[in-house]
Image (spheres, grey):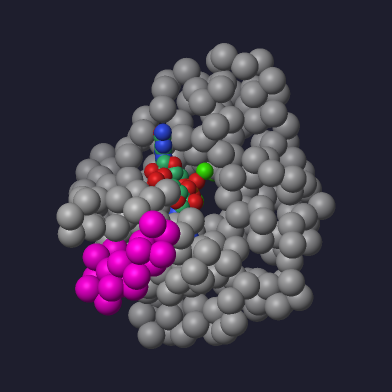
Amino acid sequence: MQRRQITVDLTAALERGELSLLYQPVVDLETGRIVGFEALARWDHPTRGRLPPSDFVPAAEESQLIAAIDLHVLRRACVEARALGHTTLAVNMSPVTLRSTGVIRRILETMRETGFDPRRLEIEITESAVLLPSPEVQTGLDDLRDTGVRLALDDFGTGYASVVHVRRFPISKIKIDKDFIFKLGQDPDAAAIVEYKVRVGRSLGIIVTAEGVETPDQLRFLRSIGMQEAQGYLFAPPLPLAAAVAMLEREAEG
Ligand code: C2E
Ligand code: CA
Ligand code: CA
Ligand code: CA
């Protein structure tokens, strides 16, 4: 599909409500309990079926439509996540969205209008947002933090972000990309890198989450180095809301 055509179709898709959300549990490795869910966007395309973000986020970022998508996802997630008890709700925001005018004000508006507790919200931002911070982004993120919204640095270690960047921002969590987790047990360097990141997080007083945990061996290793949280198919794939609610209920029943 041409990128321009995707953009035209996406604009209509937003109006027609074709974007839906899946929720992937985040597990506390100390207690084994679900502490949060990450909302992940899908496009229910009328002819092509359910499309993953990799099929439409890049085109949406080029055309600036991503800000409308991210805010739509945020609003929808804030409404739907009322069914998810007191767990944390994590939402992804593109660096393009963070740089767009008025976005912080609109995030705060969304919180107010949906009545969602800002302290339950975590916004996942990627390294490129902190590597080239405009003064507006920097102040905007500080303003957000003042309302109780937490910031997580997504895919930490895939680019050039370092401890220095983490410290400049009000970041309360770093997420280790699944590519590093997949290499555990095969690439000896991967284990050292992941272990180093857990130590960096500890020393900064920041929670560290591992993404893409698929096997019991990976989990055993992550526990042994003191990883705090994990997410991955071993626990659950991204789930429709009803299935996420059911999983929480099963957990509560013990
Ligand atoms: P991400 O934020 O790094 O999200 C994690 C991705 O890993 C998700 O892919 C998730 O489904 C997948 N995943 C989780 N556990 C496992 C596992 O055990 N094994 C494997 N192989 N994969 C796992 P998904 O849902 O396709 O999303 C891809 C990316 O799209 C996300 O990466 C995020 O950067 C972006 N994205 C998703 N929703 C949104 C959104 O609403 N706005 C923006 N701007 N980006 C979004
Ligand atoms: Ca804990
Ligand atoms: Ca994410
Ligand atoms: Ca990732």
Q: Is residue 45 left or right of residue 112?
A: left
Q: Quadrant of the C terminus?
A: top left
Q: Nearer the viewer, residue 227 or 30?
A: 227
Q: Is residue 156 magenta?
A: no
Q: Nearer the viewer, residue 132 or 117?
A: 132
Q: Is residue 253 left or right of residue 71?
A: left
Residue depicted at 59% across the width and 40% down the height: 176
Eyeballing the image, is 174 above or below 237? Answer: below
Is residue 140 visible in the rendered structure shown here?
yes
Q: Position of residue 154 (x, y in %)?
A: 58, 50
Q: How many marks?
A: 0
Q: Main secondary structure of the magenta part?
A: helix
Q: Position of residue 167 (x, y in %)?
A: 78, 57
Q: Position of residue 165 (x, y in %)?
A: 77, 55
Is residue 35 visible in the rendered structure shown here?
no
Eyeballing the image, is 189 above or below 174? Answer: above
Residue depicted at 23% across the width and 57% down the height: 44
Q: Is residue 9 magenta?
A: yes
Residue depicted at 44% across the width and 79% down the height: 111
Residue depicted at 64% across the width and 22% down the height: 191
Name the residue furthest right.
Answer: 164
Q: Is residue 113 left or right of residue 163?
A: left
Query: Which range of residues does the magenta coloring cover?
Result: 2-19
Q: Nearer the viewer, residue 145 or 49?
A: 49
Q: Is residue 149 left or right of residue 44?
A: right
Q: Position of residue 244 (x, y in %)?
A: 27, 50
Q: Nearer the viewer, residue 189 or 114?
A: 189
